[in-house]
Amino acid sequence: MSASMLAFPADLETAVEQAKDAAQQALAAGLTRIQVDLAIPELKIQPIAWQFLQAFVDREAKLRVFFPDPGAAALARRDWGELPFAVRGMEELKAAVQPEEELFIFIEPSSVEVQRLEQLCQEIGDRPVILLNARLEDVATIGIGYAARQLRERFLNQWQSAYYLSPLEGAAIFQSYPQPWQVWQETETGYELLQEYEQRPNGEDLDRLFAGLAAVDVDAPIGVAAPTATASRPNRGGLLNELQRFLRALGS
């Protein structure tokens, strides 16, 4: 690993800090449709969102934060206290985009809200948007026909990943802008970089990388890993144990 290569995160707090930095770098590079994904099972999004938003609070009223529904937005406003920026549900009457707003962050939008998300992005125009833990590729909701293909070509394909972390069993997919996509394997002493890719590795890529092991489906629902040959891919705890401890701390 070169000196400039970002280290694999040792815990969730480090991952969020890396995500903040990667998103800021993507914004500085002029990207306007940015995705940040911490594809971790049982992740409680509100405290993660709060930590992530600390990178942008100095924008004050120029920042707008959206949750999928008014209830989640109201809960965030209650827990976060007085804020210098607006927090709204995507369907709220008060959710209209304002001229003075310069950055928009959507927290965990799903394919159920994809039409409303597209509408809001049209209103936003060329101002930058960040999706935090979006779940937009639900085939059951979006469909697989012509209309779904149009939606992907028109809207979903325009997003660029600034940060991605998805633990698998004994391994992980990792990407942090502007670095390439990477696959890391868990070892007795930590995580070891196995391979880099220009694009997100798919199931066939991982099959080839983990030759002789069962296939890993990276398109499975978040937090679901396919069976693997655990003897060849050791699961010593590492990041997964750190994540479990962090999640327990958040819930206490």
Image: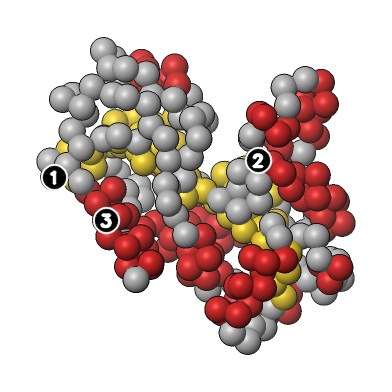
Work out whether mark 3 precedes mark 2 in sequence or the reverse, and give the earlier one.
2
Outermost residue, left side: 188
- Is residue 46 depicted above or below 181 in this figure? below
Q: Nearer the viewer, residue 103 or 218?
A: 218
State the residue at coordinates (39%, 56%).
15
| Residue 251 percent coordinates (x, y) | 38, 67
21 with respect to 150 (left or right): left
| Residue 177 percent coordinates (x, y) | 50, 48
In this picture the colour scheme is secondary structure
Residue annotated with mark 2: 136
Q: Amino acid at mark 3?
A: Glu
State the residue at coordinates (32%, 55%).
243
- Badge 2: few (under 14), some or many (20 or more) residues near its Cα, within 10 Å? some
Q: Amino acid at mark 2?
A: Leu
Residue annotated with mark 1: 189
Q: Secondary structure at mark 1?
A: loop
| Residue 131 percent coordinates (x, y) | 63, 53
The disc at residue 242 is 3
State the residue at coordinates (82%, 55%).
120
Q: Nearer the viewer, residue 135 or 174?
A: 135
Work out whether mark 3 precedes mark 1 in sequence or the reverse, and give the earlier one.
1
Quarter the C terminus occupies:
bottom left
Q: Is residue 233 visible?
A: yes
Q: Secondary structure at mark 2?
A: loop
| Residue 4 percent coordinates (x, y) | 35, 50
